[in-house]
Image (cartoon, rainbow, N blue to C red):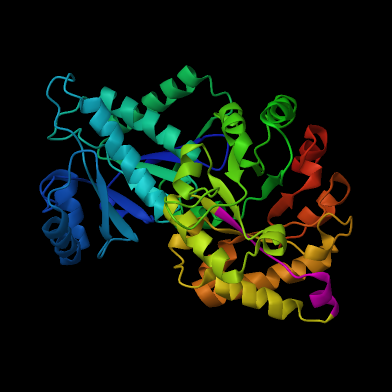
Amino acid sequence: MNTIVRLDLGGAAQIIFEAGDITEQQTDAIVNAANSSLMGGGGVDGAIHRAGGPAILEECRRIVARDGHLPPGEAVETTAGKLQASYVIHTVGPIYRDGLHGESSILASAYRNSLRLADRLGLLSVAFPAISTGVYGFPAEGAAEVALGTVIDELAMARNVRLVRFVLFSPAMLSTFIQAAIEQQQRREATGWNFTTTTQEEFNPRKEKEAMMSRKKIIAANWKMYKTPEQARQFMHEFMPLVKDHKRDEIVICPPFIDIATVSELANGSNIEVGAQNLYWEKEGAFTAEISGEMLVGAGCKWVIIGHSERRQYFGETDDTVNHRLKVALEAGLAPIVCVGEVKEERESGITEDVLRRQCTRAFAGVSARKAARMVVAYEPVWAIGTGLTATPEMASDAHQLIRREAANVFGEEYAQQLRILYGGSVKPENAHALLSQPEIDGALVGGASLKADSFSKIVHW
């Protein structure tokens, strides 16, 4: 029986090493070590084209006719044809000469760009061969070192990809890649990593995917218009030690624009990610006091809040402008937290469902399930924000179920079951456990209680 080695990176991400035929894998994307013409060749490239059938070649021809040959280190996706995958991602590795002509840099780009493309496509799992180690002549030990270092770094930043499989053509290559992973663990002093073994007969890709697609909770802080950069720095110094070993939930802090650089710098390399509280729907231009998605990404943001009730109440935000912002956030590679919720009069009038349905339908208009893969929704009953009032766990759960149904209507049932829906409305350490224990509540968007390190850490540890 062939052995599979699994490396758990201490969070949601995993790497699996196995010897076998990559064309037989059940996965979201199979990476093809292609040549620049994308016309098929020997080794893995030819095997993928033969197993996938003519549909792959036909799409490759269209891409080359439109864009020309694929440069080394770049990546592009096509249909997977007859393969048991959703996509084939084609990338071109370097031809090894002597190691002095940028070969390692090009190889790293091939892995990096393939993973980033898979992440933008909203994919969960990717299968790689050992790129450039065949007729391209890259020494196996060096190739494995580049591959593992790049993949581990990219998994730490990925929004969607959680499982990378190295499907290698020989037991010797398998041993080389496993040794490279062990060396990465030692070099990084990663005591939280864990190696386990199983057999190919016991490994079930479908069950693995179902287990990994369980909704990981998000605890997000919305600092609103509080904290100077120095106050933000002091908060981070106090907060980070309190949550440094927390892996169960994702932690996000959304400070005012002026604090983003400070918080991003301090959070770099930690289990804390950074978001913004708003963005504009143009990439650039004469829009005084606005900020674009590209600017936020450049400042270190991975998240952005869109359509918060205070933006609707005080600054004229509408369902339509929420839709505009959502589209540009996704294009910029940000993970949007789209806020919906009813005011007190609407709840008392019994029209909460109508309000949520309208807000979701208009916000999601014109967005595909594939592009919306990174989106999160936050239900914030406006009557509970800053008032000390809180929706009961049952009320919040009912609203979340309705939002999930609306998402299913727009994006499909499979997408809706993976959509994470947060609760936001006077979340405090005292009520966090009762709210977050509800299976329909996938996290919290925390306002006032996130401004003090001790208070917010207690919510994180709910």
User: In this rendering, would 9 be left or right of 37?
Assistant: right
- Residue 249 percent across, percent down from the top left: 66, 44
Residue drawn where x is 18% and y is 20% of the image: 99
When the figure is inspected, residue 384 is found, relative to residue 89, above or below; the finding is below
When the figure is inspected, residue 350 is found, relative to residue 301, above or below; the finding is below
Residue drawn where x is 44% and y is 46% of the image: 294
Residue 104: name its quadrant: top left
Could you tell me if residue 176 is visible in this image?
A: no
When the figure is inspected, residue 54 is found, relative to residue 406, above or below; the finding is above
Q: Quadrant of the C terminus?
A: top right
User: In this rendering, would 381 be left or right of 205?
Assistant: right
How many numbered discs, if any? 0
Could you tell me if residue 281 is visible in this image?
A: yes
When the figure is inspected, residue 211 is found, relative to residue 14, above or below; the finding is below
Residue drawn where x is 13% and y is 48% of the image: 69
Judging depth in this view, the residue of 427 and 260 nearest the camera is 260
Would residue 77 be counted in the magenta stretch? no
Residue 371: name its quadrant: bottom left
Judging depth in this view, the residue of 298 and 380 nearest the camera is 298
Judging depth in this view, the residue of 365 and 14 nearest the camera is 365
- Residue 225 percent across, percent down from the top left: 72, 44
Q: Quadrant of the N terminus?
A: top left
For the record, the magenta segment spans 336-348
- Residue 276 percent across, percent down from the top left: 59, 46
- Residue 20 percent across, percent down from the top left: 29, 45
Residue drawn where x is 42% and y is 40% of the image: 16
Residue 400: name its quadrant: bottom right
Would residue 347 be counted in the magenta stretch? yes
